[in-house]
């Protein structure tokens, strides 16, 4: 789940990881993602709902959507269409 242009560049891998970590902790990024996608990735959930989301793959799908959104709209526009994970 990382842009293709950083696969062989350890420094860029660290920068991308840190960017995703930063964005995940920033309310403005999360609000913009929710507005764009309708997904609230940090919604408060009961333990059973959390377990269901984890088991069904919804949690991973939501996080993948968040990372794809970050790549497309915030990491860098050039080449974004080629950076989606297969």
Image: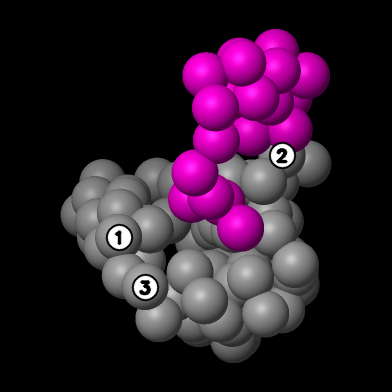
Quadrant of the image occupied by residue 25: bottom left
In this rendering, the answer to whether 38 lies above or below 64 is below
Residue at 60%, 72% in the rendered image:
33
Q: CA distance from mark 1 to mark 2?
A: 18 Å
Badge 3 marks a residue whose secondary structure is: helix
Asked whether 50 or 28 is in front, the reply is: 50
The residue under the point 31% across, 70% down is: 26
Q: Quadrant of residue 48?
A: top right
Q: Which residue is mark 3?
A: 27
Find the magenta span and give its range: 40-59
Image location (x, y in percent) of residue 68: 64, 60
x 38%, y 58%: residue: 24
Q: Kindly tell me whether residue 75 is visible in this rendering.
A: no
Which residue in the protein does label 2 denote? 61
- In the image, residue 48 above or below residue 18: above
Residue 69, horizontal then vertical, whole percent: 63, 68
Q: Using the image, determine if residue 84 lies above or below residue 10.
A: below
Residue 25's tag is 1
Q: Nearer the viewer, residue 23 or 73?
A: 23
């Amino acid at each position: 789940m990382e842009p293709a242009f950083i696969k062989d560049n350890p420094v860029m891998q660290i920068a991308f990881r840190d960017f995703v970590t930063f964005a995940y902790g920033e309310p403005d990024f999360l609000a913009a993602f929710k507005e764009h996608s309708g997904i609230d990735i940090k919604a408060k959930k009961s333990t059973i709902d959390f377990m269901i989301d984890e088991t069904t793959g919804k949690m991973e799908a939501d996080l993948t959507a968040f990372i794809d959104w970050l790549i497309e709209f915030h990491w860098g526009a050039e080449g974004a269409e080629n950076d989606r994970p297969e």
